[in-house]
Amino acid sequence: MSRAAGTFVCCQAAFGKAVPAFQLTALSTRHFFRESFLVGFSPTLPACTDARIIPQFKFSLCEMPSTIELRPNRRLLDHEFEGYKLNLQSLPHWTHDLEESVDKLYPDELQYSFLHTRLFALHNHLIADYWDHHYSFYYIDKKQQVRKIYFNSDNHSFTNVVVYDVPAHVQRKSGHFNLCLSFPASNIAVISDGTGYLHIVSTENRTNTDQKWQTVYSSLALGENNFFVIIDTRVHEKNSKIHVHCLLQSIEQLDSHFCSVLTLLTFENNGNVWKQTNLKQLQGKGIIHYAAIETNCAALYVASDNQFKFTKDSEKDIESIKKEEEPKKIIYTWMQTMDDITVTLKLGPNYDKNLLHVFVSPVLVKVSYAGNIFVDGKMVHKVDSELTTWNVQEDGQVDILITKSDSMIWDGFLVGGDIHGQEILDPSLVEETHKRLAHLCSESLVTADHTVSAVSTQELEECDAASEEDTVLVRWDITHHEITHRIPLSVHQYIFSITIEAREVPAIALRHDVDACIWQPYAKLPDMNLWPTQHQGTLMAFGYVQSSKQNRKFVTCPSNFSYGVVCESSRHVFIYRSNNISSENCQLRQRSPGGATKRVKIGHQYVFNIDQYGEVLGINATNEYLFLLTDKCMVVVQVM
């Protein structure tokens, strides 16, 4: 098992029966070389260095999409953590038989794509209310009623009441999805019935179990025969009006393949009437690992292994579509070293040197011939313009040498990019990068860093193989339909997402070496090109242990990151506790051939059997309890 690799294998048996499995693994050398130059730093793999002594993130500041490099906070990592040992102690737990079983659907013969399979398999039927600080959870039963289950931690009793009856019951047919429930505010709920209807519901004070919910708006959100699930919802006040933003996911078949569609709907309340005011839509072929609405509702966050693009906007035309229709014509190339940039272009036959004009200032460059402009724009960094030289060869090739002011690799040539220019990688830099990354694919060990890894590389398994996928988390500006920031995730396997605070977007758990680091994206800072993404906590060695559980259905953790959970569909729940490690859980181990010893820390693994309770349909982890929803009952496991 290597600290530089990661794997994600979706749950087989996610439905309690055979379903397609998939595997997404960490970044290849070829992909990493390209991504490294986008961020403008020396291409060194963070996972192979001491990630505990470098800043949390780094990015370039320019009008092109800023590439952010995630760097863990060393104070939230622990080199002394060795791993987990099995604890046979049984965990206290309580059960509550459901009065009505959970409403659940399986994909039919028309929903045969992998996108459909994944959407159904990973649907969490247990909905937590993060605005309510009690142990209050919701599910939708077979009668399409929203039921609230309250767990009293003092006497370990349960209260189960119906709070809402989903309107416009439609007979199920091919193409329908599971019902969804989301809480964008403490007094508002949004419900989709899986048949195309979206309901905005006033819940008033949800801590009052006697309070019945009232429907304030219903519509066929995407029109007839367009079915969807709810990914995220958010309430935003603007111009003294309440706006509810709903992010929906649907699947469409285009020609011979299926694609994922994200639709952002905006509803407005002027004090008396609700109405839909806007529809924006993105489309892509890839899997959507994560999607959320920025807290200021100015952007979308999307993590996928395929590029998405805006296809609809009810407020303005999609300019990117028009740009894509224009053929891309390369009229010059540029190549860089650490110290200079060479711009190369080709003049026509019978050229006249006197008609060639080259202008280079510390920040601007313009190259033209006979009134035709080849290069014109602002460079991303300053240059020493006095050292600029150029040469015209007999065949009309022009080579312009521009010297950089600072020795560094640029993440682009012109601010905002140039579709008519193409970067050519310098062979010497390619060779240097391959040498620096050679330890990732060679059989020899790297001895420069004498820090001993908690887990031996001899324990490498198939689930730790390198990735060939390019998963990227991007921030989409929904007004200008453009990507402002991107975070490559291929080297950091996406594991799961959790809500830490009700008002923030879900945090994402990414694999860093053998650990799982929890990152919280925050809204882009106004008037600055900054997208803060903060390392909030770490599940020690959890990135490694979860990757070996190929039958996992749900993976999660509580908001204080005190334990991690890997849940199978119908057999076991694996609980990994690494915090509160006391002195008796520290052991002396021989750590080097010289006989030196080092104190290492051991966590606990608990195994909870759930086969007697039926298929697990939902899960939520709190700081003290783990809540499991099965097709028969609610199970509460005391973890802390």
Image (cartoon, grey):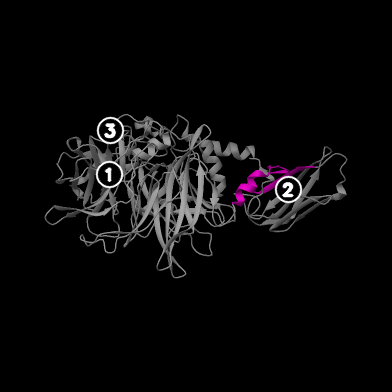
Query: Residue type at mark 3?
Result: Gly
Residue 598 visible in the displayed image: no
Query: Residue type at mark 1?
Result: Gly
Give the camera-side residue of 436 and 258: 258
Mark 1 vs mark 2, foreground winner is 1
Q: Which residue is mark 3?
A: 16
Which numbered marker is on residue 618? 1
Give the camera-side residue of 230 and 144: 144
Query: Residue type at mark 2?
Result: Leu
Give the camera-side residue of 462 and 373: 373
Q: Label 1 vs label 2: CA separation?
A: 61 Å
Magenta-drawn segment: 318-346
Give the camera-side residue of 32 and 181: 181
Residue 307 among those drawn in magenta: no
Q: Residue at x 72, y 44 (%)?
A: 332
Mark 1–mark 2 contact, CB under 8 Å? no
Labels 2 and 3: the sequence-earlier one: 3
Q: Secondary structure at mark 3?
A: loop
Q: Measured along the vertical axis of the image, is residue 253 above or below residue 507?
A: above
Image coordinates of residue 520 in percent, x first then y, are 39, 54
Mark 2–mark 3 contact, CB under 8 Å? no
Q: Residues within 10 Å of mark 2 (few under 14, many from 20)?
A: many
Mark 3–mark 1 contact, CB under 8 Å? no
Which numbered marker is on residue 401? 2
Which numbered marker is on residue 298? none
